[in-house]
Image (spheres, coloured by chain):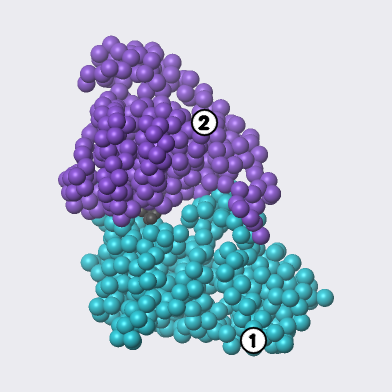
Amino acid sequence: MARKLSFKDAINEAIAQEMERDQSVIVMGEDNVGGAGSPGEMDAWGGVLGVTKGLYPKFGERVMDTPISESAFIGAAIGAASCGMRPIAELMFVDFMGVCFDQIYNQAAKFRYMFGGKAETPVVIRTMIGGGFRAAAQHSQCLYPIFTHIPGLKCVIPSGPYEAKGLLIQAIRDNDPVIFFEHKAMYALKAEVPEEPYALPFGEAKLLRSGEQVTIVAFGLMVQRALQAAEALANNGIDCEVVDPRTTSPLDETTILQSVAKTGRLVVVDEAYPRCGMAADISALVAQKGFESLQAPVIMVTPPHVPPPFNGALEDLYMPDSARIEAAVQSIVK
Amino acid sequence: MATQLDKTNLLNAYRTMKQIREFEERVHVEFATGDIPGFVHLYAGEEAVATGVCMHLNQRDKIASTHRGHGHCIAKGVDIDAMMAEIYGKRTGSCGGKGGSMHIADISKGMMGANGIVGAGPPLICGAALAAKFKGDQGVGVAFFGDGASNQGTTFESLNLSMVWKLPVLFGAENNGYAESTGVKFNVPTANISDRAAGFGMPGITVDGNDFFAVYEAAGEAIKRARAGGGPTLLECKTNRFFGHFEGDAMTYRAKGEVKDLRERCDALKIFSTQVTSRGLLSQEEMTTIDSEVKAAIDKAVALAKAAPNPTAADLLTDVYIAY
Ligand SMILES: Cc1ncc(C[n+]2csc(CCOP(=O)(O)OP(=O)(O)O)c2C)c(N)n1
Ligand SMILES: [Mg+2]
């Protein structure tokens, strides 16, 4: 039987294998080792949820802790990338991106184009997204649409361990800046993951389930929920197709449009805010290029346009779940 | 230690520190039962800092807090029933259950909010001080921030801005030796965080943050100067945290027996008790009475919080300009 690995371990393995293959790959982030300057153990944390744990004993000073100075160290990762290194910088929670946003959207994203193709910035910024932890408004957001909005950045949202490993390896080898969004509620999720290194190309969606009546496009954790909903709907005789774009930049328009051409109906599930988010973006794509095949309005399943609440009951209402996805599908299938 | 504080004030100081300690010890216990959601960062061990600083403040004065904010809230007079309810995510909480431990705020008390973003407080408090300056109300602003937050660009920029604008600010650096698992020796290359003040032409002082009187004296001078238009001060208080970075932290980065030792040698409440009893300023009985009153108050806060209702579904869509 093939080996199973958690989402967290799949990320760790991808980093370790690339560090072994390529000396220019380095890792940095707050507490990515953990225990520096403290009297107890080193490698004490491996990042706040332990994703990089075990890398320091293997790779020594190529795994670096940083002060809480995101502008400086994210900027330094970007600068080092433009000078021949391949840094993987961890910015704990995507919510903290505000602190260092200039370095990402005016610097990293622009170099190649603005310098007439003469620069490369092979940096990877790993960051956690998503709700479910009762972590409230500053630790639960899914801000990937903001980054998708910026030309020059590549945006990756793995939906499981297999995708996490393959997409992260591609991110490290890629010569453009990549923001890698890890949903914190998925770290323990296990699935089959090949032992050898493999890269999954960007801009290629994955068809996770084929069906005839409705296309469901979903991102990250929402892919898992869309699959649950599709399963339940199948038991009620409704046949859904589930598409995971895997990267929002570049976006595989073809697979989405082909699926909608077949089913004639679209539900987009996105944990990000509804305004100017991926659900709105995919809806616009289909309205522009797939209008003739639509037999029903496009439905967006997203949180309401409010910040993530702390209270658990409110947060459960806030996040899209499989019941809401099922209801959305049912509303457009007669 | 020589003090100008009268008996009432000494009793108040003790009561505030005890409330913080008891509150945090209790949240620690309740968190372990699984009833408290989210990320919780406890202030136990650092009581003398919030108390020694906030005793100089009135309701008009503002404080900006951190993720480790319970102590600041209590010292600034936020209602403990409302705080506890907020930590449980209840509708009766200070933020209606929408914020939680990391976001407790009470604007009416000048408590501008605990904060989930490290280094977010110093710029905000510059704004509070600017507002006080324009209003001419003699108000001051205090930004509490950790040794880790002292490395944030926002903090450095605020130190500079407050000097340039001569703002009535106290920067209260709470150096508890750690930023998450990383020691201050790794993160801060100078011997003291306060040494950095010189680079901005600002007065910088370091005091023993476990000694209430040391904090009280130093903060008093700085706040007096700020109120009189003399500009900002960076006050570093060296202290310790008695629990993990957050609840659930195994603390393998700490030395074996470290916390036990700190609780024996560096406990702000024990140090205070010894100071006041040995000088005959307060009696042990007076403090024991406060202990039992505080314990009863915390018991009540927990009971009320547990029994309180959750927010309603409709609350999800309120308090924002529009929800759709
Ligand atoms: C901008 C930002 N970066 C990182 C974090 C994660 N984080 C939360 S608390 C913390 C450590 C803070 O250390 P310190 O300032 O010393 O405060 P202490 O926890 O010791 O009170 C870190 C890194 C955050 N919340 N915000
Ligand atoms: Mg600290």
Horizontal arrangement in the rendering, residue A153 relative to residue A73 (left or right): right
Q: Which residue position holds label 1?
A: A289
Residue B274, disc? none
Q: Residue furthest right?
A: A334
In percent of width and height, residue A8 lies at: 44, 67
Disc 2 to disc 1, C-alpha distance: 57 Å
Secondary structure of the residue carrying tag 2 is loop
Q: Nearer the viewer, mark 2 or mark 1?
A: 1
Q: Chain of mark 2?
A: B
Per the image, label 1 sits on a secondary structure element best described as helix
Please, is residue B98 above or below residue A235 in the view?
above
Q: Position of residue B254 (x, y in %)?
A: 29, 47
Q: Chain letter for cyan, please.
A: A
The residue at the point 30 percent across, 49 percent down is B161
The amino acid type found where label 1 is placed reads: Lys
Q: Quadrant of residue A131?
A: bottom right
Is there CB contact under 8 Å for labels 2 and 1? no
Q: Is mark 1 within 8 Å of ligand 1?
A: no
Residue under label 2: B79
Residue shown at 35% from the left, 68% from the top: A103
Which residue is drawn at the image coordinates 42% and 65% (left, top)? A127
- In the visual, does A237 lie left or right of B14? right
Amino acid type shown at disc 2: Asp
Q: On the rendered structure, is A320 left or right of B145?
A: right
Toward the viewer: B29 or A288? Answer: A288
Question: Could you tell me residue A292's position as x and y percent?
Answer: 72, 87
